[in-house]
Amino acid sequence: MDKSPYDTTEKNTVFSSIEGVESALMGCYSALQSPYYYGRNFILIQDVYTDNAKLAANNTGKFSSFYSLQIATNNAELEEIWKIGYQIISNCNSIIYSLKNQKFDAHKTNILLGETYALRALVYFDLVRLFAQTYTLPASSNVLHANAKGGHAGIPLILETDNADSVKNPKRSSVNEVYVQIISDFKNASELLQTQEISPYRLHTFSTYALLSKVYLTMHDYVTALEYAETVIYSNQYQLVENENYIESWSKEYTDESIFSIAMTPSDYPGTNSLGHMLSSKGYAAIAASDDVLELFETSDIRSELFSKLSEVHSNKYPGRNGIVGLDNIPIIRLSELYLIQAECYAQRAKQVSSFNFPAQQALLSIIQRANPTIFSVSETGNDLLNKIYNEYQKEFAFEGNRLFQIKRTHADMIRKDCESTTCSIIFPNYKFAFPIPRAEMLVNNSLFQNESY
């Protein structure tokens, strides 16, 4: 397991003051910016591996293993995500230990502790969704211990500092055990952050509620997911960007619907390694949008204007700021996602209580009508309504790092029609819906076992 970059002496120095602790926490936030994490790869993997994207004609092999659905255990992109994720977790553990064992200002301690719990939860949520099968994987999948309640293998759960014995050769916890910890961390954070100033770049109570809603949705706990989603929706803290401002909003640092984003300043700018550079027609344009996703948009849908056509169609969702291609803040969760979670939860509950169809339709209409004001109603019910919601997810969050996780949690087949690979589809359940534990980690930790079929 990759350890914190601090040695013992450095840790003693860093954590000897509240300012040092906050600096360490800012380092954890900064690690999210890495091109190997949210700054590029974590986002693009989910589109290239699914039906949202394809390799552009001028692509020189970047992400080709994901497009071909042939992932080796030594895949460099996955090794980097694993390494950065566990480095953040290690540093979070050290921050938590320091804050609990030193007497700093109580209010400041609570705020920093809350942010650290929330950040650790976010990283665990990311890693367990990448490197394990989805929480609700059924027993019929024949995956060992799968029981539709997270009984199958997850990832190592490390909650102590690097010098603790439990950190040495940690075993894989079950998916359920990881989710229990994620929920605990987010709930602890939400309590500690009650007085935290609302900012799109620092985790706070409402961003933890929003992320908890996603966690419970992934667990198919639609009642609790709905409760957290509506708490944020009806908080009056956020509002949807209006149709006429939607395209321009992507060149802004943040908007009224930004719940949590990763800030990217000129000093953080990764240059040609940025997400925008990889996607934009003004950059490498190495990843193109697939016909599968483009065909979902009506011509009057404002979101279709986020694509530009050269020889192929490219996403301009990350246009840069001040003329700098790739200088974009990265949205982690936006208000529009809470509306779609609300719609999905009501639609799922409508299977038992038909009156829930109406609030599901209204929540969905909020997003559809924002994108296309010529649409005035949603009439679908049952599975037709759910499919319409799922299509809206795909349109709204294309190239935002959501597609693979959506397919997994809904037990959908991944079908690519616009595809030039030997393998174009994955039928659920399938071992390919969990990426392999990185070989580098397997070599140094003999307590681990590999995911099925890798």
Image: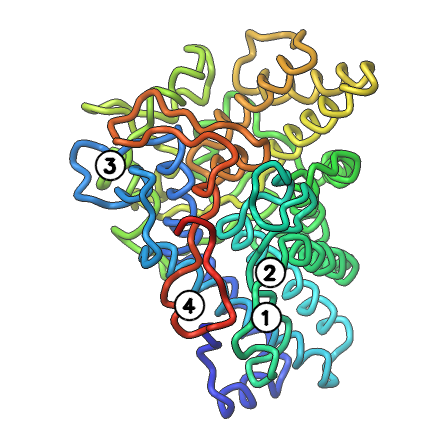
Q: CA distance from mark 4 to mark 1?
A: 20 Å
Q: Which residue is mark 2?
A: 119
Q: Which residue is mark 4?
A: 441
Q: Compared with residue 225, is residue 33 higher up or lower down, i.e. above or below?
A: below
Q: Compared with residue 61, is residue 372 higher up or lower down, i.e. above or below?
A: above
Disc 4 marks a residue whose amino acid type is Glu
Specify the label residue 92 is tagged with. 1
Disc 1 marks a residue whose amino acid type is Cys
**Horizontal side, residue 296 vs residue 269: left or right:** right
Q: Which residue is mark 3?
A: 285
Between label 4 and label 1, give the one nearer the viewer: 4
Q: Compared with residue 129, is residue 281 higher up or lower down, i.e. above or below?
A: above
Residue 19 visible in the current orientation: no
Element marked by disc 2? helix
Q: Compared with residue 165, is residue 272 higher up or lower down, i.e. above or below?
A: above
207, 324: nearer the viewer: 207
Callout 1 touching callout 2 (CB < 8 Å): yes
Q: How many marks?
A: 4
Tell me what residue is drawn at x 63 percent, y 66 percent.
116
Specify the label residue 58 is tagged with. none
Disc 2 marks a residue whose amino acid type is Leu
Residue 285 visible in the current orientation: yes
First reached walking from the N terminus: tag 3 or tag 1? 1
Disc 3 marks a residue whose amino acid type is Ala
Label 4: how many Cα within 10 Å (few below 14, some 14–19, many 20+): some
First reached walking from the N terminus: tag 1 or tag 2? 1
Q: CA distance from mark 4 to mark 2?
A: 22 Å
